[in-house]
Image: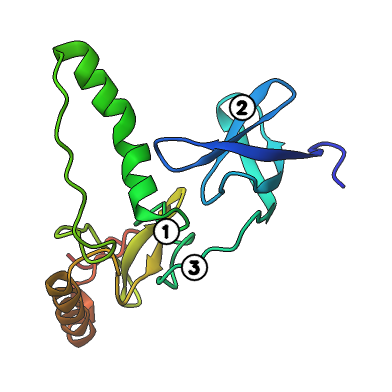
Amino acid sequence: MNKEFPEKKIVVDRILPDLKGEGLFEQIRYSFPYAQIGDEVIFEERGRGKRRHLVVKEIIRNKAFQFNCNHFTKCGGCAGQHIPYTEQFFLKTNDLVGEINNRYRITPILIEAKDEYSYRNRMDFAVFPGNIIGLHQAGNFRKVVDVEYCHIQNETANNELEIFRRALAEFPEIIYNRKTGEGF
């Protein structure tokens, strides 16, 4: 145990609209990605002021969950595969519906995606030297997780991603290298 950064432990008691699990420790609320209600999160609080950040040491799951993606929790493409889609939809829209209702006195009609996967028709992929094509790492914009297939984007977009990957493999010199300034 690190004396400078003592471990803290919370039990997640609610899920926020951004799909992070939140709990209370010594009258302060903390939130963590990929945590569900009832999960115990062991973490350290490091740094001071603007450099303060949380380091999750362990999440003790209250219940198991399954997800389709090998990149879930690594890339920043999606944040809620550990939560059933209908619940995700409610969490993401409930506050907005309340705000619209309070402000304009109307209740919007919400339409969920037909499918839990393959619903996105637009994704922004990053390209890095070494033929790395993917999404930024969750919580770290400087790193990219190589993604060969994304379950939340539609099949046409996944086909285009594969075509793009083959084109860059054939012409690697066009990949822009931020460190050397070479490429396009």
Residue 32, position as x, y percentages in the image: 56, 42
Q: Amino acid at mark 3?
A: Gln
| Residue type, label 1 | Gln
Q: Secondary structure beneath disc 2?
A: strand
Is the C-beta separation of discs 2 and 3 under 8 Å?
no
- Which one is closest to the eye, mark 2 or mark 3? 3
Q: Residue at x 19, y 85 (%)?
A: 166
Nearest to N terminus: mark 1 or mark 3: 3
Residue 179 located left or right of residue 8 = left
The disc label shown at residue 81, or none = 1
**Label 2 belongs to which residue?**
29
Asked whether 170 or 101 is in front, the reply is 101
- Indicate whether 50 appears above or below 13: above
Q: Which residue is mark 3?
A: 66
Name the element at disc 1: loop
- For the residues labelled 1 and 2, the Cα–Cα distance comes to 23 Å
Classify 10 Å Cα crowding around label 3: few (below 14), some (14-19), many (20 and above).
Answer: few
Please give the name of the residue rendered at 49% of the width and 68% of the height, measured from the top-left corner: 66
Residue drawn at (41%, 52%) of the image = 79
Residue neighbourhood size for the residue with mark 1, other residues' Cα within 10 Å, grouped as few (<14), some (14–19), many (≥20): many
* Residue 125 horizontal/vertical position (percent): 25, 62
